[in-house]
Amino acid sequence: MNGPEIERLIQLLSRLPGLGPRSARRVTLHLLKKRESLMQPLGAALADAARAIRACTVCGNLDTVDPCSICADPRRDQTLLCVVEEVGDLWAMERARIYFGRYHVLGGSLSALDGIGPDELNIGALVERVTAGGIREVIVATNATVDGQTTAHYLAERLAHAAVPLTRLAHGVPVGGELDWLDDGTLATALKARRAL
Amino acid sequence: MNGPEIERLIQLLSRLPGLGPRSARRVTLHLLKKRESLMQPLGAALADAARAIRACTVCGNLDTVDPCSICADPRRDQTLLCVVEEVGDLWAMERARIYFGRYHVLGGSLSALDGIGPDELNIGALVERVTAGGIREVIVATNATVDGQTTAHYLAERLAHAAVPLTRLAHGVPVGGELDWLDDGTLATALKARRAL
């Protein structure tokens, strides 16, 4: 009933994470109301980004240059390597401004349920980077989920021969978190890993 | 840190209704992962729609043709006019497939708080359409909000001289709704408007 242009737009928008058919319609109406100030710029920005952005062949980060600006930055510690599941995790680390080494993006985590094995992930390149030498620590920053931890253990096996220290992020009570709301697993981990006050 | 293309995309996406900076980042990552299958088509669809869609000069509906396909459809009852606030309301009526007359989109509702008076709405054209004759009923389908009802009463005043019957949608218990969850106002209205079983 809306003409093919609008229907196609609703259909594409409803494929975005967090948007269903209903919110996609709402977004479409909002865009149609702001054709000049939002719809056209957004269309152009999507086309620009789709054209310009590529995956870094070194670490898997997304950037307009290859190697990406993090890999190419000489001020970054080249002896530290942080392994993350997704580019979003890399962004989260960068937002926190607490890490100044380099990254390796796996592109996901091992998952028997989703049929994702080691060959689907960017693991071969990681093993090559680490065995090539010059790295003094690999920080495995996969998610604290079952799949993330499985992936971390698999990486430990694959990198055992390189004799490079592997570390993982600490588990515990999130800063600002209340014990009452915490799950038992986190609380148990936090108790076991308790430190001197 | 992400390059200007990505930052601009996040910034534009975060202006969509229902999306904040966090979900805009999530959507951006999803799009960057599906550059060929989703990002490029969405960019093109936005550009296409922004170019092709215009407001109907008769009723205010959005369509690729002017007058819109509803106004131009000779099978539609030309003596019935349904007044709605927004194009989204027109879409809702059309989805329900219960109305086969024509529409008039006001483009909002009167709102003292938002400084929206009669001149900001598509009311002049409505008065012209109704006084031009040939209409046997005007269904005022503004929202059942304070602003929507204010608008309905204002329209009744403005259209009083045309001597065309004005009606409004019935208020009451939504089909499938439970009394326990209903607000008192709706319940009172439903009781007053009760009908023979």
Image: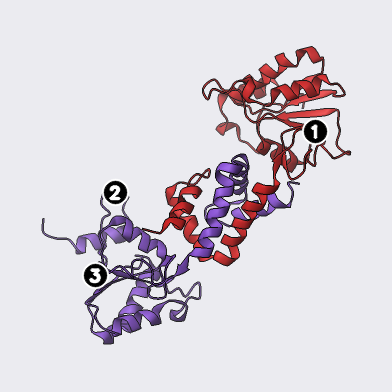
Chain colours: A red, B purple
Report the mark closest to the observer, 1 or 2: 1
Which amino acid lies under the numbered mark 2 shown in the image of this protein?
Asp
| Labels 1, 3: one chain | no
For image coordinates 42% across by 68% down, the residue present is B65
Residue occupied by mark 1: A102
Q: Of B101 and A180, which appears nearest the observer?
A: B101
Which amino acid lies under the numbered mark 1 shown in the image of this protein?
Arg
User: Which residue sits furthest left?
Assistant: B197
Instruction: From the top left corner, tell me how far across and down residue B1 is, in percent.
Output: 76, 46
Which amino acid lies under the numbered mark 3 shown in the image of this protein?
Asp
Q: Of B156 and B195, which appears nearest the observer?
A: B156
SS at circle 1: strand
Q: Is there CB contact under 8 Å for labels 1 and 3?
A: no
- Which of the two labelled residues, at mark 3 and mark 2, occupies the earlier sequence position? 3
Disc on res. B180: 2
Residue A175 shows up from this direction: no
In the picture provided, is B8 more to the left or to the right than A102?
left
Query: Are there few (<14), some (14-19), or many (20+) residues within 10 Å of tag 1?
Result: many
Instruction: From the top left corner, tell me how far across and down residue B160 is, in percent.
Output: 28, 84
Disc on res. B36: none
Residue occupied by mark 3: B77
Q: Quadrant of the N terminus of chain A?
A: bottom left
For image coordinates 67% across by 49% down, the residue present is A49
SS at circle 2: helix
SS at circle 3: loop
Chain ID for label 2?
B
Q: Of B84 and B100, which appears nearest the observer?
A: B100
Instruction: From the top left corner, tell me how far across and down residue A82 is, in percent.
Output: 76, 29
